[in-house]
Amino acid sequence: MRYGTFQSEPVLRRPASLRVKRRVRNNPFLIRILAFFLFAMLLIIPAGAFTFSPPSPQVGQSVYFTNTKWMNNPQWNFGDGTPVVSGASVSHTFSSAATYTVVNFGTGIDYETITDQKSVIVQPVPVIPVTPNAVFTVYPVSPAVNQLVTFDASGTYDPSGIVKFYSWDFGDDRTAEGKVVTHSYSVARSYTATLRVLGSGYLIETSDVSSTPNLLDSESRQIPVRSPQSPVAKFTFSPSSPEEGETVYFYASGSSAPDGTIMSYQWTFGDGITATMSGFETTASHAYSGTGTKSVTLTVTDNNENSGSLTQQLTVVPFTRPDAVITADNPSPQPGQAVRFDASKSVDPKGLIDRYEWTFGDGTSGSGKTVSHTFPGEGSYLVTLTIRSSGLSDTKNAAAYSDTATYQAVVSPYTPPVAYFVFSPARPGERETVSFDGSGSYGTDGSIKSYHWEFGDGYVADDIRVTHAYQDAKTYTVTLTVTDSNNKQGARSMAIPVEGNLFPFLILVPVVVGTGAVSVDQYKKFCRRKACPKVPVEVRWSGGIALKEPPPEGVKIDVQFSGGIREERGK
């Protein structure tokens, strides 16, 4: 059976069945009431309606959009070219001031298209101008009367743009306009200088528009003006004792102007000559034509027309020229032998010799304080030295600052060295030591560098002084050969007779008195002169000591021979 219909059976008429029937019939009614209520609600809510806040947004400010009616998948087009977004509540920021048409669209309950749109007017951000900051500097900070003072407002800053104008009040009823101005004060006292600036009026973005700012700003400061100071003149000069005709340089760079800038240098040189230089020319030069003391005056003038002066004395001495001198280390050179010429003894009273020029008389030349030269052959050569001084002045000719000296170099044929020697004793005996001395040798064209001895018995030696003993009595020829620094040689020979014992078979016994010893050499020399035997002799010492040999060394002895011969010996 269908819902809401009943069969006419008696069983169904019971009270319990009646209650069931009554409950079932009420359900359609409740459904209709609920549907009506929902329909009424849909009629009250407008289709596609939305709101946004704030109502008058500004550029860059977030705007919140809210859908106020049920809509399936609501979407938003903000009208500024940005992508469409979805959502019941969204936010958006507009980048420029304009009127935008915002569209909200979606589908309703029956999937019908719902669209709504509204105009959103976006306002520009309010802006206001910013006050400039007036700043200025003063130079000099403590100027003198009539000194030009610079007022500089370059440090002024306007954050909103460019300063329109700069107005100055110097505190002495004088005014000016401009970023950088100059002014001078005529009376020494303190002044209040004031700078006023006006901003450009350009605006910066801000949300505070409660008050209009002032575009003017100012700054003041005290300017102490003092009495003027005169410039100070200072100068030095060089050389300190100039010669007549020599250029003197004057240096005024030490001058100063406390209240300004030096504009001119006026020179009076003390000999009737003057010169005026600009403020950039601190060096002057002058050459005096006479000798004596000169009064030099410098006057400096600054830009305030104040002046200062200084006078100094300088003495001009007579002119002295350089003196050239030549020395040579080899006064008699040989062909091919180098000669060293030296100009060190040349003088210049000013110590300014800077060039040494040589000609050697054989077609060659050289330069320098010392030179070495070898002449090509025998003959006489005129060597010339010319010295030149760097003190040469425009007022003097070159001859006044130069000098010339000459030297006659004679190149002669070569002369070998001369060998010369002596020996001692003059008549040596057998085995006696002979001393030879060759220090008397000399070189005519060079120094002796070696000595060679040949003693005539097969022995040789090399030294300036040597010794030798001959074993046999006979005459020997001794030869000394010397070699000089030019490898040239000279020789000398001498005959030396060597004598034997005078009484070889005479036996004399000496008597030694005292203690000590005598050297063997002394004993041998003594015996040679006194004809002592070659065989050992008996030597008696005090105390009864007897030795079969010559006495020991180191003691002075008294020797007495038979026959009354006596001699005192000692080491």
Image (cartoon, rainbow, N blue to C red):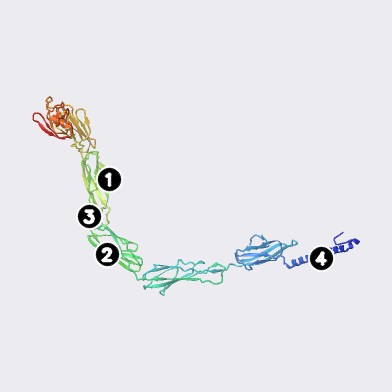
Q: Which residue is mark 4?
A: 29
* x, y percent for residue 558: 12, 33
- Numbered badge on residue 260: none
The quarter holding residue 464 reads: top left
Q: Residues within 10 Å of mark 2 (few under 14, many from 20)?
A: some
Callout 2: SS: strand
- Contact check, label 1 and label 3, Cβ < 8 Å: no
Which comes sooner in the sequence, label 3 or label 2? Answer: 2
In this view, the residue in front, 24 or 3, is 24
Question: Is 311 on the left-hand or right-hand side of 207?
Answer: left
- Pair 3/2: label in front: 2
Q: CA distance from mark 2 to mark 1?
A: 48 Å
Question: Is 294 on the left-hand or right-hand side of 34?
Answer: left
Which comes sooner in the sequence, label 2 or label 1? Answer: 2
- Pair 1/3: label in front: 3
Which comes sooner in the sequence, label 1 or label 3? Answer: 3
- Numbered badge on residue 366: 1
Q: CA distance from mark 1 to mark 4?
A: 146 Å
Q: Residues within 10 Å of mark 1 (few under 14, many from 20)?
A: some
Q: CA distance from mark 4 to mark 2?
A: 135 Å
The quarter holding residue 555 reads: top left
* x, y percent for residue 564: 8, 30
Callout 1: SS: strand
Q: Which residue is mark 3?
A: 320
Question: Is 323 on the left-hand or right-hand side of 529?
Answer: right
Which residue sits at x=27%, y=64%?
A: 311
Callout 3: SS: loop
Q: CA distance from mark 1 to mark 3?
A: 26 Å
- Numbered badge on residue 311: 2
